[in-house]
Image: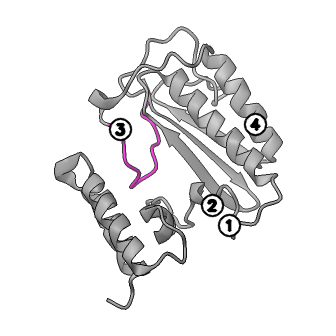
Amino acid sequence: MSQIDWPAGWERTPARQRTKNRNYEVELQQAIEDLEAELDRLGVDDWRLSTAMDHQSRNPNYPYANQPEPNDPGVVVRWSMDGEQYAVACDAYSRVRDNLRTAGLYIREKRKMSNRPVTTGETEFANARLPSGDGDTVAAEAPPHEILEVAEDAPDAVVRDAYRARVQEAHPDKGGSREQFERVQRAREAMLDDE
């Protein structure tokens, strides 16, 4: 089996927290073909699928057929578009095909959203954009108001209340991670820069 090319710094779902997903009745090959069709609609320059399965040498985005489910069912889809590098990753489910289908549906929804006549200040794929550089890459951080789940111009009291709720969820002792915890703290500091 191959090793998955998971983006550096992106959190992984612990194996014991991965769940079965019976919502998708699609075979792995169909999930890949659907993903490829979405990326074609998006107009990507090129794309690459990474899984822990062995992939075909002639068609590297397709794993060989009839492989057992790998210990690591995660998938990473990377692509380039308009000179920018993007990636989405999913490892929430116990089967590769379910994680792949989830990534494909995410890309489809983001593509559809980008066609709506709404201005958000960023493209719908801004959160999937990878930073430039030769070394390890890290995920771009969401704006502070999105991390705290408040309006961009929320009053300080609302920001403080949201912070208290988010920091409890993100605390490592409560099932979160140190990275999540620090991210929530940075968001609070950015929104309450006068403190």
Q: Which mark is residue 126?
A: 2
Q: Which three-letter amino acid code belongs to the residue tagged 2? A: Ala
**Residue behind mark 4:** 38
Say whether marks 3 and 4 touch (CB < 8 Å).
no
Q: Is residue 45 left or right of residue 6?
A: right
Q: Nearer the viewer, residue 115 or 90?
A: 115
**Residue behind mark 1:** 122
Magenta-highlighted residues? 2-13
Find the residue positioned furthest to the left.
Answer: 173
Q: Is residue 118 left or right of residue 21?
A: right
Q: Which three-letter amino acid code belongs to the residue tagged 1? A: Glu
Say whether marks 1 and 4 touch (CB < 8 Å).
no
Give the prevailing secondary structure in the magenta stretch: loop
Q: Residues within 10 Å of mark 1 (few under 14, many from 20)?
A: few
Q: Nearer the viewer, residue 26 or 80?
A: 26
Q: Quadrant of residue 19?
A: top left
Say whether marks 4 and 2 touch (CB < 8 Å).
no
Q: Quadrant of residue 167?
A: bottom left
Horizontal and vertical percent for residue 128?
58, 54
Gap in Å between the C-alphas at discs 1 and 2? 6 Å
Q: Secondary structure at mark 1?
A: loop
User: Does the magenta portion include 89?
Assistant: no
